[in-house]
Image (tube, rainbow, N blue to C red):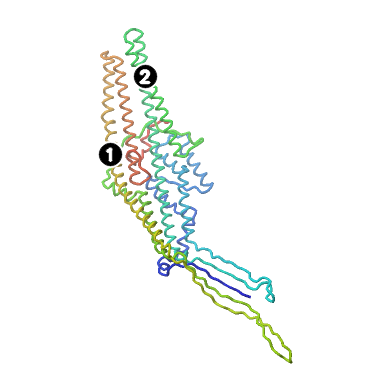
Amino acid sequence: MIARGVFKARLVLPLAAIALSGCVTDQDLAGYSAKDAGFGVVSAAVSIGTKGKDTIWIQNQQQAKAVSERVQGLVHKKTINADTAVQVALLNNRGLQAAYADIGMNAAEAWQQGMLENPTVSIGLLGIGAPELGAFRAIEGMIATNILALATRKARVDIADTRFRQAQMRAVDATLKVANDTRRAWINSVSAFETVAYLNQAKVAADAASELAQKLGESGAMGKGGQAREHAFYAELTGQMAEARLASRLAKEELTRLMGLWGSEVDYFVPDRLPRLPSGVIKRNRIEQEALENRVDLRVAKLELEAVAKSYGLTEATRFVTDLEIISGVEAEREIETEYEIAGGNLEETKTRKTVVTPQLELEFVIPIFDSGKARLRKAELAYMQAANQLAEKAVNIRSEARSGYTAYSATHEIARHYVNAVVPLRTTIEAESLLTYNGMISNTFELLADTRAKIGTLMLAINAKREFWLADVNLSAAIYGGGTGAGSSAAAPSVGDAGGGGH
């Protein structure tokens, strides 16, 4: 019988193997196998970037039910402020759950890269039914193990770990983006309803002017031109009112969408007016440094460069020899040896079974004649240069976004304070004086109504200025922590106490 054992393995050049090999312990891989692998880092970073809000990675029915009940308790038939809206979005937005699943997939990839490859075993029978040797003549067995994978294991795990940490930061960035978008949607929704309220006041004044013009026209005290002007103003205001109501409904619907609400959950309200302006702006003398230290997307870019650098090292180490196999084994062959002997004038035959053991060693490798690995190395070099330049661009852009964000934050606050503290009080004084002159029969009704309309127009400008400030506040936060910058500034959140009463 022949028993052949073959051990097949892949090797890289000895020095490269030593440079890339290393022990990856079970403790190193334990974190990757957890169901919520890496989510603690995400949760902590989100809490910092959203001023204490929490998020959850839903992975079972119990968690889903608990989140649903919590969301229902936060919004159902309640007037919600910006902080509540953000908290609901972080709990209930399904797009975030998809981003969190990406963390798990990258953790599983790192876990997979840390595992040893399973050996390949094959067994074969040769010479089945061979005479005098029984059912078969030989058994051939082979065990193959990929030593290249073993030699590069630690390098591959390091790359996968970098990608895992990158997925964590991408999830943080996605969460901050949802938080910022939700806060903007809340601001736009409240501002839209506040605009509707003031337009309604203007419409009442316009209606009164139109009705008065009609009566004066019937008495002959006002010409058709004057009547038409008042009627046209009322008609135009009616159209603006319809547009404003549509805008308010759409703004609230956007907020609902970002919070992931549907069914009975959409039965909630927003305040009637935006929060009051703060007395002053937050001084940030290190705004660029703050952004460079805290921006999550900058961390993502740094991790991209790190991962590409590690991949480049692996490519360089395996440039020339990508397939080196050593096959070793022992061949044990059972043979029948026949001996002849003459005894008593007769030829006698004696058969003896014997086993011959022969060790064997084979070396198989690819000669890099046509493919020297230069193309792969060049590709890796360019990928590294690309990542490095993208990181540099990101750093420059972040500095600019931080500066422009703080500029907009400061300027919009000054503009809004100007409307609230100067323009609106002046219009209020004009309206009050107009009322006094009207009561003294010095001015007529149309002059009083004109001053009232002018005041309402100023109030709407003040609403818009406040809205721009709060949007700039959100955008400043995005410029410092990440999550996408919008059309203005960034960050602080309106508080519950500042928000107006009623709701929509």
Residue lying furthest front in this view? 370
What percent of the width, then of the height, locates residue 432?
28, 21
Q: Which mark is residue 410?
A: 1
Which quadrant of the figure has residue 461?
top left
Q: Is residue 333 left or right of residue 269?
A: right
Q: In which quadrant will I find the N terminus?
A: bottom right
Residue depicted at x 27% and y 13%: 441
Which quadrant of the figure has residue 213?
top left
Which amino acid type is shown beneath numbered disc 1? Ser
Q: Residue 234 carries which label?
A: 2
Mark positioned earlier in the residue sequence (2 or 1)? 2
Q: Which mark is residue 268?
A: none
Which amino acid type is shown beneath numbered disc 2? Tyr
Q: Nearer the viewer, mark 2 or mark 1?
A: 2
- Secondary structure under badge 2? helix
Residue depicted at x 45% and y 61%: 28
- Secondary structure under badge 1? helix
Q: In this view, does 425 lie to the left or right of 241?
A: left
User: Within 10 angstroms of label 2, few (less than 14), some, or many (20 or more) residues?
Assistant: many
What percent of the width, then of the height, locates residue 181?
40, 40
User: Within 10 angstroms of label 1, few (less than 14), some, or many (20 or more) residues?
Assistant: some
Residue lying furthest bottom in this view? 344
Q: In which quadrant will I find the C terminus?
A: top left
